[in-house]
Amino acid sequence: MPTSTPSASPAASSTGTHFPDLTPDTAPPAARRQLDQVTRHLGYLPSAAARLAHSPQLLDGFLKLTALFDTTELDPTVRETVILTIATRNGCHLCVAMHTAALTRLDAAPDLITALRAQQPLPDARLEAVRRFVHTVLDHTGAVPEPDLAAFLAHGFTPRNALEIVLGIGAYTLSTFANRLTDAPVDPQLAPYA
């Protein structure tokens, strides 16, 4: 596991000037439908989506991957544990705020959210097994040692769940990297969770 969270450097923050927020009117035609859908779903257009729209394929791919991840056998709190683990590990401040809000809406325990944000062991053993598994998958680029997989499975998870977590890792690595590249800011709606 990393000992520190990557952070945006002054040079990194300047990359956002290359990715101004787009709207359904200014985005490439292939991204307009997705931006309209995101706006209808959330009630506003997040800056992250407005910037990902510079690449309609990336925006479309991310939305499809997250929709698939949402249909897995993993319950919403497990999925958000995967996502917030990726967000903190990759230093995506926007993603941390967004998924802190999601866990709050799920009535997750405040100590769980605090531990996830601090990259600390979780108070719930089953969710801690998920957090550790995410780090192990990343640390070993997928070649998870048998004892680590067995430890994950011992918490009531299945081989299918292990692969579903890999799907989540892929989807949210894509978004955290893209959000950091575009320097997407935290939207006002998420500021209380930043």
Image (cartoon, helix red, strand yellow):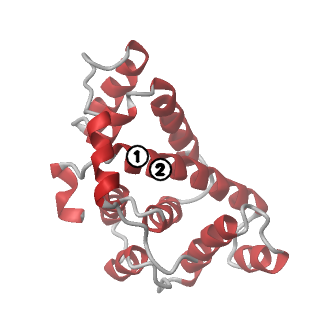
| Quadrant location, the N terminus | bottom right
Give the image location of residue 114, x and y in percent. Answer: 35, 79
Give the image location of residue 23, x and y in percent. Answer: 25, 24
Which sits in the foreground, 46 or 124? 46
| Label 2, label 1: how far apart the Cα atoms are | 6 Å
Which residue is pictured at 50% across the width and 62% down the height?
86
Which residue is situated farthest in the right direction here?
146
Which residue is pictured at 61% across the width and 71% down the height?
135
Q: Is residue 146 above or below residue 55?
A: below
Q: Is residue 155 above or below residue 68?
A: below
Question: Which residue corresponds to mark 2?
Answer: 177
Name the image quarter holding residue 17: top left
Q: How many residues crowd around disc 1 within 10 Å: few (fewer than 14), some, or many (20 or more)? A: some
Q: Give the structural element (helix, strand or loop) at label 2.
A: helix
Name the image quarter holding residue 33: top left
Which sits in the foreground, 34 or 94? 94
Identity, as a three-letter code, of the amino acid under mark 1: Leu
Q: Give the structural element (helix, strand or loop) at label 1.
A: helix
Give the image location of residue 129, x and y in percent. Answer: 62, 77
Q: Say whether residue 92 is left or right of residue 189.
A: right
Which sits in the foreground, 34 or 182? 182
Please say if the residues under marks 2 and 1 sit with CB atoms less than 8 Å apart: yes
What mark, if any, has residue 181 been given in the picture?
1
Q: Say whether residue 85 is left or right of residue 36.
A: right
Residue 184 visible in the shown view: no
Q: Say whether residue 77 is left or right of residue 69.
A: left
Identity, as a three-letter code, of the amino acid under mark 2: Phe
